[in-house]
């Protein structure tokens, strides 16, 4: 008798647990969806978002002095920077600044290490391309499209 | 031009007779219906799943993504049919055809409306169960012929599962047959004039639905194609439209099984205001919705637990139910 | 004779490296008798990237991004662990605010890791829906962490002597809204999954790991605690600000799959408590220790540091000669030891249980392969 009771109890409690589960999914079905339809809707980027690095644009151009600190710090050896002096005894200024974004891990060490604070993260996130060579970015050339920070 | 068409029609009518012609027209109608129904069900399944999971589901192709499944079907048709080299070619090719044929035949007797069954056979219910039993043969053939370990495991499981679950399915249907006193589906619907059988036979109805879910290999009984264990189970090696046929058969099978459930327990085409066929379809799709809802809620049973469940719970309860029904009918009738 | 061989024929099944349930590139060589597993042999190394060797070729600081790529599901925990190890070796004291921020982020990351495990485990067992609910919750955490770390998965947020960026209002608001939301969700998970009779049948009494077995194989983390052994590095060898925070270590009784599942769900609740307390006590002050060199180097010697990652005890063994570049860096990852017990648990189970047990161990394969 006891066994029969346990058998029936097992059937009923099991059925109840299944019904409760179905109640949960029904409730969720009536909730608004949680997804964002990506190409049509976009979420705002977080404040700290890390995109490929860029040179910050100032009224007098960029502030990079081509000291090479970022180049040495970069764990992946992504950065190449070369400076040029306009004339003897002048400040060194970066003439060439390339990164290979396809190997960048966005750790942010270069941005932090920069003594001139010339680097910043961009807010670009659609960085997919058909070729790995498209990952190579010329930051000096990209500087022209930057908004100037007064 | 029309004269010629008319002549041909007259000639066909004279040679084959009205019955044969009705069957041809009916077969074409059924084939079209099967396709449309499967496309709609796949769409419905994806939408139901999506909304349960806080998503939207297909929305790009057509209004509400309705044409998404059509596009998917075109993709399937255009894909290459791959036959693995170690596979048994004959059985491998035959299996999808065999799985698809038996699911068509029940449409012969399904009573969509009082006048709509193509042939109102007096053993309609038996015919449906007989043909749904063929399904398992096709799955076994496909799984074995693929010469793939996962497919073989899926096929083995499928056979054991189908054999186990056909018994409670039949037993629960039997108790309805005892009440209606006929195997003809039309008579069964007619017997539910006053009250649906689900009221008299709630246990049988639940057993039938559980058994039907297992019979159609749907979650939580989708052991033969358990994705996380057996990759894709018996149809692991199938591609293109061969896979598409398995898919089509699964969804059509769902429709057949739900239609039988509606006929047996939920009053068939009966309902106020609307014509019978609309009530029938409405009920069927509501039932299919419930089956989908179940699928997207529960985890999968383990294989031996599934067998335990069939032999230790469903079959005894179904037998008991049948016994009680027979006794009560004897006493009352 | 033929009959005998047919009946007793065993066959080999390659589960993975490409299989829906091995979560990455683990390969299990199973010897089956019908559906019963006779023997299991895990094969690893498919995603070996040589992180330990990489460490010997770059400076202490440059190894930071690597840490988050070993266990990509709890990247911030690894980040935190590495920074703590090097800081302890160098004798750097971290300002309390930075340490609290780290703990908040680490615990959020631990919740995210457990949530992903929860979802993936249910997916292994055939339930698709909880997977997406868990991902919805995890998405909230990723968005919150993205507010300060700037990344979503492979964080590089901790620095020697502090963190890279201070918390902002969006982060604080996000966390405060998230905690009650997850509590509600956990209640739903218990109704939907923990009490579900199918789930109970699939996991109760499956893959039982005795405490002795767990100790023998050096299993750690929730897997060990599910066997009833009270060992959590956060309590046993407290580090960071954990001694100041009030939390419990959930324990299991039987060491089966269900206990491993339940311990993780309870741990999420405890992590929420830690985050709540840490937010309350969050001191003000600097987020970077003053006077720390950009590239500190530990004085010559060998150091070991233990950390409780989402999967168990993470051991970092550092050897320094005082130079810029580590001489040797050995990572003792929890998943490796947790995997080692698998063959013993699997012997004699069914294929379906194989998946349930494998999933319950919460292995992250890139962490094993490093």
Image (tube, rainbow, N blue to C red):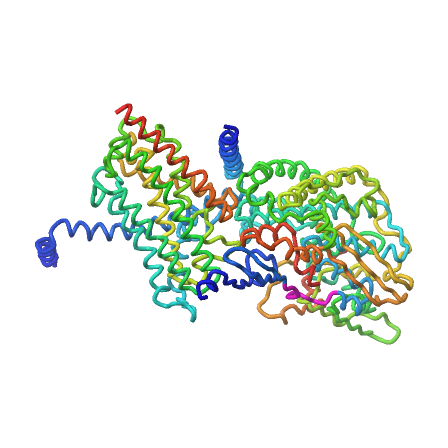
Can you name the residue that lies furthest to the bottom here? A88
Q: Position of residue A147 (x, y in %)?
A: 70, 58
Q: Position of residue A50 (x, y in %)?
A: 70, 56
Q: Is residue C93 shown left or right of residue B71?
A: right
Return the residue nearer the eye: A110 or B173: B173
Return the residue nearer the eye: A34 or C341: C341
Can you name the residue that lies furthest to the front here? C1
Q: In the rendered image, which quarter is residue B197 located in? A: top left
| Residue C193 can be seen, yes or no | yes
Q: Position of residue B312 (x, y in %)?
A: 45, 40
| Residue A59 can be seen, yes or no | no
Q: Is residue A50 above or below residue B40?
A: below
Looking at the rendering, the stretch of residues picked out in magenta corresponds to: C43-51
Q: Is residue B114 above or below residue C299?
A: above
Can you name the residue that lies furthest to the top here? B332
Q: Position of residue C61 (x, y in %)?
A: 81, 62
Q: Quadrant of the C terminus of chain A?
A: bottom right
Prevailing SS of the magenta stretch:
loop
Q: Check residue C45 for magenta coloring.
A: yes
Q: Is residue B329 shown left or right of residue A128?
A: left
Q: Is residue B195 above or below residue C45?
A: above
Q: Check residue B56 for magenta coloring.
A: no
Q: In the rendered image, which quarter is residue B311 located in? A: top left
Residue at left 70%, top 42%?
C267
**Count of numbered circles in the view:** 0
Q: Is residue C149 shown left or right of residue C319?
A: left
């Amino acid at each position: 008798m006891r066994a029969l009771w346990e058998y029936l109890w097992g059937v009923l409690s099991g059925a109840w647990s299944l019904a409760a589960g179905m109640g949960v999914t029904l409730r969720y079905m009536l909730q608004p969806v949680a997804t964002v339809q990506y190409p049509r809707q976009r979420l705002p980027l977080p404040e700290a978002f890390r995109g490929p690095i860029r040179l910050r644009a100032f009224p007098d151009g960029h502030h990079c002095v081509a000291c090479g600190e970022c180049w040495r710090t970069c764990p992946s050896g992504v950065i190449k920077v070369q400076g040029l002096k306009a004339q003897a005894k002048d400040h060194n200024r970066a003439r060439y600044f390339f990164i290979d974004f396809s190997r960048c891990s966005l750790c942010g060490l270069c941005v932090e290490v920069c003594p001139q604070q010339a680097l910043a993260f961009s807010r670009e996130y659609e960085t997919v391309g058909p070729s790995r060579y498209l990952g190579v970015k010329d930051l000096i050339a990209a500087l022209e499209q930057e908004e100037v920070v007064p | 031009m029309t004269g010629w068409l008319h002549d041909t029609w007259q000639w066909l009518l004279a040679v084959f007779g009205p019955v044969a012609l009705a069957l041809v027209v009916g077969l074409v109608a059924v084939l079209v219906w099967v396709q449309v129904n499967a496309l709609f069900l796949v769409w419905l399944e994806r939408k139901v799943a999506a909304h349960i999971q806080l998503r939207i589901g297909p929305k790009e192709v057509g209004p509400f993504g309705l044409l998404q499944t059509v596009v998917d079907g075109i993709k399937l048709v255009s894909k290459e049919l791959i036959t693995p080299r170690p596979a048994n070619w004959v059985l491998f090719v035959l299996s999808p055809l065999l799985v698809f044929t038996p699911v068509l035949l029940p449409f012969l007797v399904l009573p969509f409306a009082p006048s709509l069954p193509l042939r109102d056979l007096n053993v309609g219910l038996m015919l449906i169960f007989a043909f749904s039993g063929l399904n398992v043969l096709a799955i076994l053939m496909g799984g074995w012929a693929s010469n793939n370990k996962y497919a073989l495991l899926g096929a083995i499981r499928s056979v054991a599962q189908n054999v186990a679950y056909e018994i409670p399915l039949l037993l629960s249907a039997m108790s309805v047959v005892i009440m209606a006193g006929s195997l003809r589906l039309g008579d069964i619907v007619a017997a539910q004039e006053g009250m649906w059988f689900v009221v008299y036979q709630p246990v049988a109805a639940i057993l039938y639905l559980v058994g039907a879910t297992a019979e159609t290999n749907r979650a939580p009984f989708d052991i033969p194609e358990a994705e996380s264990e057996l990759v894709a189970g018996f149809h692991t090696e199938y591609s293109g439209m061969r896979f598409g046929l398995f898919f089509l058969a699964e969804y059509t099978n769902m429709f057949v099984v739900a239609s039988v459930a509606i006929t047996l327990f939920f009053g068939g085409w009966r309902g106020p205001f609307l014509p019978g066929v609309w009530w029938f379809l409405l009920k069927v799709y509501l039932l299919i919705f419930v089956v989908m809802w179940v699928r997207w809620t529960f985890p999968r049973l383990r294989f031996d637990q599934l067998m335990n469940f069939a032999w230790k719970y469903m079959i005894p309860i179904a037998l008991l139910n049948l016994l009680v029904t027979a006794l009560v009918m004897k006493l009352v009738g | 004779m033929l009959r005998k061989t047919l009946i007793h024929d065993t066959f080999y099944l390659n589960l993975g490296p490409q299989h829906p349930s091995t979560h990455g590139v683990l390969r299990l060589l199973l010897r089956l008798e019908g559906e019963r597993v006779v023997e299991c042999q895990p094969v690893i190394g498919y995603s070996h990237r040589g992180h330990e060797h990489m460490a010997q070729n770059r400076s202490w600081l440059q190894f930071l991004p690597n840490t988050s790529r070993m266990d990509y599901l709890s990247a911030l925990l690894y980040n935190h662990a590495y920074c703590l190890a090097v800081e302890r070796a160098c004798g750097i004291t971290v300002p309390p605010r930075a340490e609290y921020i780290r703990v908040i982020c680490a615990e959020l990351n631990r919740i995210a890791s457990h949530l992903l495990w929860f979802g993936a485990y249910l997916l292994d067992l055939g339930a698709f829906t909880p997977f997406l609910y868990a991902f919805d919750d995890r998405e909230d955490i990723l968005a919150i962490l993205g507010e300060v770390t700037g990344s979503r998965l492979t964080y590089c947020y901790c620095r020697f002597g502090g963190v890279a960026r201070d918390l902002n209002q969006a982060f604080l608001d996000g966390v405060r809204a998230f905690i009650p939301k997850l509590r509600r969700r956990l209640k739903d998970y218990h109704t939907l999954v923990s009490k579900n009779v199918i789930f109970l049948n699939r996991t109760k009494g499956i893959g039982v790991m005795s405490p002795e077995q767990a100790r023998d194989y050096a299993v750690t983390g929730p897997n060990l605690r599910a066997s009833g052994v009270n060992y959590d590095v956060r309590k046993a060898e407290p580090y960071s600000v954990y001694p100041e925070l009030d939390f419990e270590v959930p324990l299991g009784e039987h060491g089966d799959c269900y206990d491993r599942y339940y311990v993780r769900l309870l741990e999420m609740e405890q992590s929420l408590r830690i985050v709540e307390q840490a937010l309350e006590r969050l001191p003000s002050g600097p987020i970077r220790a003053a006077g720390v060199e950009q590239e500190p180097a530990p004085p010559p010697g060998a150091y070991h540091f233990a950390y409780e990652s989402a999967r168990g005890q993470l051991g970092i063994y550092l050897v320094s000669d005082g130079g810029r570049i580590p001489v040797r860096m050995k990572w003792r990852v929890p998943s490796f030891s947790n995997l080692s017990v698998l063959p013993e648990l699997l012997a004699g189970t069914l294929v379906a249980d194989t998946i349930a047990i494998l999933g319950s161990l919460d292995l992250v394969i890139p962490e094993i392969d490093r």
